[in-house]
Amino acid sequence: MELKEMITKYKDYRDRMKAISYAEYMISWDAETEAPINSVEERSKQIGMLSQMSYEIERSEEYINIVKKLYQELDSLDDLLKIEIKKVHKELMQSLKIPMNELVEYSILLSKAHSTWKDAKLSSNYNIFKDTLKEIIDFNKKMVKYLETEELKGYNVLLDQYEEGMTKDKYDKFFNLLKEEIVPLVKQINSLPNQENKLSNRLFDINKQKVFADYLMKVMCFDKTRGLMKESEHPFTSGFGTSDVRVTNHYYEDLILSSIFSAIHELGHATYEQQCDSKLDETLLTGGTSMAMHESQSRFYENIVGRSYEFWKRHYPVLQNLFTEELKDVTLEDFYKCANYVECSLIRTEADELTYPLHIMVRYEIEKMIIEQDIDVNELPIIWNKLYKEYLGIDVPCDKLGILQDVHWAGGSFGYFPTYALGSAYGAQFLNSMKKDIDFNEALSNDNLQIINDWLKDKVHRFGQTKTPDEILNYATGESFDAKYFVEYLKTKFKNIYNL
């Protein structure tokens, strides 16, 4: 078969798999936003069929041979196809190590797991979910054994899936730095006399919160012709190329900041997706290059932008006009301090910027135990509660506020959590370089964030998956990852807020 014919056949296979992926994406979106409760069984059956179809294409002898041959002809391919074939070849060689019937069964298991987790969380009963979680853990342990190499073993196999090149040793070094530099600062702040949080014990109409979330979409320049926002139990972002990017939010009457910062966080993810080069839509290279790089963007917008004084100096009057009575005695300075209020709390997604890495450390430590030790699933809530007491000094009152609070393990995402903290650190490094090119504070005071969006598009977003995280960091900042920028950023910001 000539090279041109191989490329044509490869693209035909790719297009068919993308069509199946699009169907799975739409089913998943529907399941997490508005699908009827009793549709789980039928939906799971259809997902199983789609997975089977996709795996049959991936495992076909012709497809495998084409990918292998194109990999041998990399120097003859155009730049984009060369990068894509490298990526596809690596993933294919890994997937071939896992029996197809097990992958199909796992897809079906995960399609049911979300509903089981949701039921368990709503009733705050871990026992409802534990057997399903055990099945997910067992598969991940088997997958580790299938994928282990001389270089990657144990938990490192899963860590590499989400952030290529990251290992336990590297994450341990990163988290140890945070423990040395940030934990003492948290303790110092928590030792201060209790400061009033003026937003506590106030109720904010949910419909008005939705109006402000819509306003934030305009501020962040979210293109609503290529995206939308709905509600879900756990806010998330999903998409298919640059023309279909969707986010969700969750609203609580007594937690106005929750919906605000969840919206900004998810719109940060969405900005990354919408600002990829559209020419990548036809390839397998569109979207964020890694989990941590994606998280760097969501947490950059949520924390570095969204929790800044300059941002709220411009937009707080709009919020006050919506909630005239509720915020009549809350000044801009009061609101800024509430937005950056440091408190050791239970819920990761509601955690302040400073204590957030401690929540990630709990999950990181537990995942290491799960994958590399023989931990009884019945013991996981006990271990969770113990670590929250150790790292954050608080007691966990129930499963809903403890081990059931996150959806990630129900989706089989072991190795994902550490990227959240890593992403925050990437964001601080980007900020350091951004300030050399633009007047960051002036950009925050504008009606929208277009200047900031443009910088990130040029330095990060447009590349999609055509560059590795390290290549993007070097392009944008002139150096590889360095956690010192994150530590300096946190210490400077919170020492100023708390006059330390």
Image (cartoon, grey):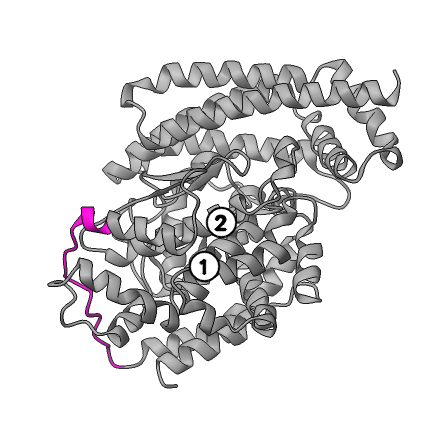
As helix, strand or loop, the secondary structure at mark 1 comes to helix
170 displayed left or right of 268:
right
The amino acid type, in three-letter code, at marker 2 is Thr
Read off the residue under disc 1. Answer: 301
Q: Which quadrant, please, contains the C terminus?
A: bottom left
| Magenta: main secondary structure | loop
Residue 340 seen in the current view? no
Name the residue at 51% across, 36% down. Answer: 243
The amino acid type, in three-letter code, at marker 1 is Tyr
Read off the residue under disc 2. Answer: 271
Image: 390 above or below 59: below
Closer to viewer: mark 1 or mark 2: 2
Residues tagged 1 and 2 counted as in contact (Cβ below 8 A): yes
Identify which residue, 164 or 480, lies in the foreground.
Answer: 480
**Image: magenta residue range:** 193-209
Name the residue at 52% across, 33% down. Answer: 240
In the rendering, at what x and y percent does residue 276 appear? 59, 45
311 displayed left or right of 162:
left
In the rendering, at what x and y percent does residue 64 appear? 76, 20
